[in-house]
Image (cartoon, grey):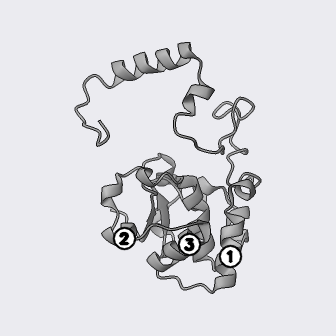
Amino acid sequence: MINLDVAVKQPQREGKGTTWMQEIVPLIMSGGDPACVEMLPNWDRVPWLEEHRACVLDLEQRPSPRMFSTHFHHTMMPPSFFETKPKDLKDSVARIAQFLEKPLDTEVMEKIADRCLFKNMKQNKMSNYSTVPREFMDQTKSQFLRKGIAGDWKNQLTVAEAEYFDAVYKNEMKDVEYKFVWD
C-alpha cells in the first residue's frame, strides 16, 4: 500500500485540467522554482497511480510529500477542497497552496500563476507531451494541450468517427453497470 501524501486530481465538474494541476502543485511544493517543471516530464514528476509505470518509478521510495495523479472519483477528495470557488488562476494557486499547507508569499504565487497560464504551459516541452513518441501520440494531428471547450469533440471528429467511437464504446461497456451522475 502506498502512503499518499498529495494526490493530484482536479474534479471534472470544475472544468480544470489535471495537466494544469501537474504543473501547479510541483511549483507550489518547490516554492516556485521553475526547474521542477523544466527538467522532468509531468508524467514522471506527478505520475498516474493507475498507470503501469507507477511500479517502475519506485513511488514508495520518493520523499514525502509525494505527488500523484489519479482518475479516482472527485468524491474521494477531502470536503475542504470544495468549500470555495477561485475567481482566477492566482486564486487557485493560493487555494491549492493553502490546501497543501505550503505558505507562499504573493510574489511567488504570482510567478506560479504566470508560469501556469495556458499559453506558457503550452510552450513547456516537459508539460505539453511533445516529447512523447509519435507512435503513442501524434501531435501533428492535434496538440495535447488545447483549450478545452465543452462539445469541442464535434470539431475534432468527423460524423463517421463519432459514430464509430459510439459503437465501440457501447460494445466495450455493455457489461459495465455504472450510473453516471449526469445521466
Image quadrant in which you'd find residue 133: top right
For mark 3, give the secondary structure: helix
Mark 2, residue position: 83
Q: Position of residue 7 (x, y in %)?
A: 43, 63
Identified by mark 3, the residue type is Asp
Q: How many marks overall?
A: 3
- N-term-proximal mark, 3 vs 1: 3
Distance between mark 2 and mark 1 Cα atoms: 22 Å
Seen at 55% across and 61% down, the residue is: 21
Residue 89, compared with residue 42, is above or below; it is below
Q: Is residue 8 left or right of residue 146?
A: left
User: Label 1 amino acid?
Assistant: Glu
Q: Which residue is mark 1?
A: 110
Figure quadrant of the C terminus:
top left
Residue 149 percent coordinates (x, y): 57, 41
* Residue nearest the observer in this picture, 68 or 148: 148
Give the structural element (helix, strand or loop) at label 2. Answer: loop
Residues at marks 3 and 1, CA–CA distance in whole angstroms? 10 Å
Q: Provide the residue designation for mark 3.
A: 91
Q: CA distance from mark 3 to mark 2?
A: 13 Å
Neighbor class of circle 1 (other Cα within 10 Å; few <14, some 14-19, many 20+) is: some
Residue 78: x %, y % from top left: 33, 68
Classify 10 Å Cα crowding around label 2: few (below 14), some (14-19), many (20 and above): few
Precedes in sequence: disc 3 or disc 2: 2
Q: What residue type is disc 2 on?
A: Glu
- For mark 1, give the secondary structure: helix
Residue found at the very far front of the displayed protein: 87
- Quarter of the image for the N terminus: give it: bottom left
- Left of 149 or right of it: where is 180? left
- Who comes first in sequence, dot 2 or dot 1? 2
